[in-house]
Amino acid sequence: MSSLTKHIAIIGAGPAGLMAAEVLAESGAAVTVYDAMPSVARKFLMAGRGGLNLTHSEELTTFLSRYREAAPFLEAAIRAFPPERLRHWCEALGEPTFVGSSGRVFPQSFKASPLLRAWLRRLAAQGVRFELRNRWTGWDGEGRLTFQTPAGTRAIAAEATVLALGGASWPRLGSDGGWVSILAAKGVAITPLRPANCGFTVGWSDIFRDRFEGQPLKGIALSLGSRTVRGEAVITRDGIEGGVVYALSAELREAIASEGEAKLLIALRPDLAAGDLMERLKAPRGKQSFSNFLRKALQLSPLAINLVQEVAKTSGLALSSASPEQLATLINGLPLKLTGTAGLARAISTAGGIARDEFDADYMIKRLPGVFACGEMLDWEAPTGGYLLQASFATGVAAGKGVMRWLGL
C-alpha cells in the first residue's frame, strides 16, 4: 500500500485526461495522472500516423450536428472549447495548424509526436505527475482508488477523480473497456460499447478475396437510404472499410442490428450523369471482353470491374446478356450486402459508454460524487474528420472545470 496523499487523480493519459490535468494544474491543484500503459497517449500517437486530424473548420452549428443525438449533451463543452480554441492551444505549444482542402484541421508538422512532446513538457512545468503501469481496479472499502502495479496493489485517496479511460477500440493501445464492470457494479448505467467508424463484413468469394484484399476503391460514392457520401474504401479479407464507409458506419451498424444485414449501394462512377453513362455503355463492344469494354468505356479499375462481376454473380445476373440500362443501374447502384460489423479491436472509435443521464452539467457522475468522466467513456459517437478528438479535448476541459467548481478552486 502507498502512503495516502490527498490530490486530484486523473485516470487515463489520453487527450481527454491530459487536458483535464492541464486545466486543473493551471488552477494550482496537485494533479497526478495514472495510466495502465508504460507510456502516455498511445492511441493519440497512432492517430498521428495518418496526419493527426485535430478538428474541423466548418461552421459550429454544422459541426455540432455531426454528433447526432448526442449533440445537446456535448454542445456546452464544445462551445466552451470550440475548434478555434483548440487551434490556438496547439499554436501556443509551438504547433501551428492549417486547414486542408476538405476543411479538416491538421498541425503543420502533420504529426502527433511533436505536439505531445511539447504538451508533456508544459504539464511537467505545471507540476503534473505521472504514474504509469498503474491499472485502475476501482475503490476499496474506504473509498480510496485502487491500482494494480508491478509492485503490487496500491490505494490512493483523492479529493476528486477524473476518469478518462477511453472506449474499447484498439485495446492494445490501452483503451480496453475494463472500466465498464467497475462502474456497473456501482450502479452506473452503461450503454453497451459498440464499434464506430468501423469496417463491415461481406461474404466475398475466395477468388475475389485473395486477389483484391488490401486494394482501394477510389472516387466512389456510397448510399444508404437518403444519405450519400463520396470518398475511398478498401477491400479487406473479410469485407470493406475506409473513410467513406466510416461516414455511414452508425447507420449501417444500426441496420444490421435490426435487420441482420444492410444493403449498401456503390456508385463506381458517381461523376458520370446517367445519360452519359448510358451512352458509353451503348457503344459497340466488338470483340472486346466484357472486362476490357468496361475498362475502356468507363475507365474502371480491375478491382471495380471484378466487384461488378462479384456482385452480379451473387445476385444471379448474367452480365454478358445485360442491357446497357441494367449495366448503368449496376455500375452506379451496385448493391453490396453487409452481413456484420468488424470487431471493436479494429474500429477507430467506440459508440456507447456511460449513459448521458448519469451526468450532471459538469460531467460528474451523479451516483459517485467527486468522480467525473470525459472523452470516449461518455455515450457519444462521431464520424472521422476531427470530431472525435475535438470532443475528447472539449470534454476534458469541461470535466477539469467541473472539478474546480466541485472543490471551489
Image (spheres, rainbow, N blue to C red):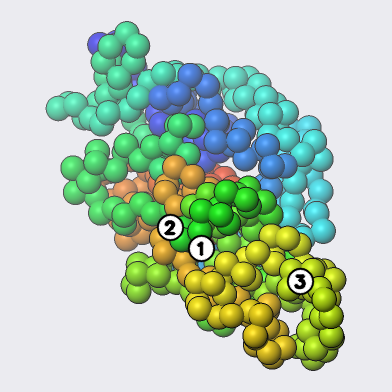
Instruction: Find residue 249 and report its horizontal and vertical position in percent.
Output: 51, 63
- Give above or below for 84 relative to 23: below
Q: Residues within 10 Å of mark 3 (few under 14, many from 20)?
A: few
Nearest to the eye among marks 3 and 2: give it. 3
**Cα gap from disc 2 to disc 1, whole angstroms:** 9 Å
| Residue that badge 2 annotates | 341
**Cα gap from disc 3 to disc 2, whole angstroms:** 36 Å
- Give above or below for 384 relative to 323: above
| Residue that badge 1 annotates | 249
User: Upstream in the sequence, badge 2 or badge 1?
Assistant: 1
Q: Residues within 10 Å of mark 1 (few under 14, many from 20)?
A: many
Q: State how many labels appear.
A: 3
For the N terminus, the quadrant is top left
- Give above or below for 253 relative to 399: below
**Cα gap from disc 3 to disc 1, whole angstroms:** 36 Å
| Residue that badge 3 annotates | 289
Please report contact status of discs 3 and 2: CB closer than 8 Å, yes or no. no
Classify residue 115 by image quadrant: top right
Instruction: Find residue 384 and report its horizontal and vertical position in percent.
Output: 61, 55
| Tag 2: amino acid | Thr
> Considering the numbered disc 1 on the image, is that residue within a helix, a strand or a loop?
helix
Q: Residues within 10 Å of mark 2 (few under 14, many from 20)?
A: many
- Residue in view at x 36 percent, y 34 percent: 160
| Tag 3: amino acid | Ser
323 or 60, nearer to the observer: 323
| Tag 1: amino acid | Ser
Nearest to the eye among marks 2 and 1: give it. 2
